[in-house]
Amino acid sequence: MWTIQSINPYNGEVNAEFQTLSNDELDVIIQRAHDAHLEWKQTSWEHRKQLFHKLADIMDADAEKYAELQTIEMGMLYSASLSGVKSTASLIRWFADNAEDTLGDKEFDENGTKGKYKHDALGVIYGVGPWNFPYNQVLRAAVPNILAGNTTVYKHASIVPMCAEQIEKFFDMAGFPKWIYTNIFISGSQSEHIIANKHVAGVNLTGSEWAGSAVGSLAGKYLKRSVLELWGNDAFVLADHSDTKQMVREATACRISNGGQKCNSSKRFIVMEKHYDEFVEEMGKYMETMKTGNPMEASTQIPPMSSLKLVNDIDDQVQRSISEGARLIVGWKKSGDRDQFYEGTILADVTSEMTSYNEEIFGPVASIIKSKDIQDSIRIANDSDFGLSAVVYGDDETQCREIADQLEGGMIFINEWAASKPHLPFGGVKKSGYGKENGREWLREFTNKKAIIYSK
């Protein structure tokens, strides 16, 4: 057993400490979650819907309080945190309202065979969550699984334990039966013990490429269903346009959202040579105006990074890129009394041999890549080990759609930031993982679609 600390990224103060669980304690929790599943899966769709609507109402009622908790624990801008709490409540309502229609029994009469399809819950689902959107990323995974009749034990990221604890409290406050959702404070090394448990039927993880590889391997070893939502090195493809300054404002917003700590934020900015010099100059001037500071203040645009380790990791990647030939336009600077900030940074003339071309930089660092023409832009966008999402910006909607059709990724956005929407499937290809969160298919992911054939 060891201690998990919650540390305020802005001022370095320790918010709280928590003790981890032993494997024996985990075994008891999983058994209770399994027992709860056997009862929960018998409850009516209407009862589940009511409970989740109550949970969403609870989040909405004290959204300011829960948003502040998220800000002091991972550093998210308070304004973004507040809107995130409200959008998470809306996400919960969408799943609650669409569960029965998606998962309810369906009669069929096909090719001379009559019967019905039934979606049976699988059991206990092990969830592993990331720190960058402490409420949303966990609840968008857990809520559909529980609506389907499963129960879940959840390992949240170790740097956001207060948010992890609060999520379990949401379920308690809404009146859910005990053990439907259980937060577990554990180390990553205990994942195999959990996945090996006979009552654990599946695992969903949002996190790094390495965490996904480790957990995915364990799921395969023990023949458990898994969904992995992993890193991205998303492309921003700039098509023909008439207003470079507006394109720069959009591009910068796509990069610095949540301090650049988003798996689906734009990271590689691919610009045709005819627009390249002007774009680089304008983005450099605009990025330089981005203000770091207290995430609770409305004037702050780039918050502290979630941890000092992340600041150092970002700086290492930027240094390597520059040593490999990238041209520094602005940034490359730690700031703050504890070096808790990383200034908005732009690297130009990035090529395929460089770190920032090939690796995801999880912070406010934009890599600008020159292309010859649209087809070359598409080639560069797809020249990545990752394929989570991408955005295309330009004046000609037809041209943008033609580009989007050829990009590799789970979601391609035209003239808007990449985002997560409850009704649309979210997930990528290549090293960005497999399976889909969100959308109706996510409600079905951890169920068994059972065909019952009637006698003639």
Image: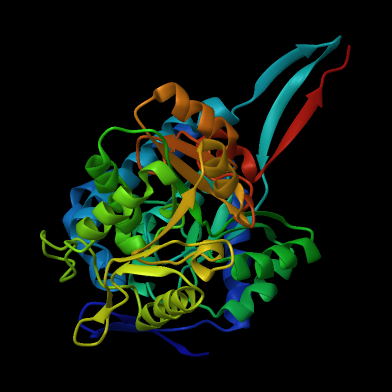
Residue 224 % position (x, y): 74, 57
Residue 154 % position (x, y): 51, 64
Seen as rendered, the residue at the extreme bottom is 2
- Above or below, 129 relative to 7: above
Q: Is residue 197 visible?
A: no
Q: Is residue 311 visible?
A: yes
Side of 104 relative to 327 (left or right): right
Seen as rendered, the residue at the extreme right is 456
- Above or below, 352 relative to 247: below
**Quadrant the C terminus occupies:** top right
Q: Nearer the viewer, residue 230 or 142?
A: 230
Residue 59 % position (x, y): 27, 50
Side of 26 relative to 249 (left or right): right
Q: Nearer the viewer, residue 405 or 192?
A: 405
Tell me what residue is drawn at x 34 percent, y 73 percent. Answer: 306
Tell me what residue is drawn at x 58 percent, y 61 percent. Answer: 352
Tell me what residue is drawn at x 32 percent, y 55 percent. Answer: 280
Tell me what residue is drawn at x 23 percent, y 85 percent. Answer: 13
Q: Nearer the viewer, residue 108 or 318?
A: 318
- Above or below, 435 relative to 243: below
Residue 117 % position (x, y): 71, 26
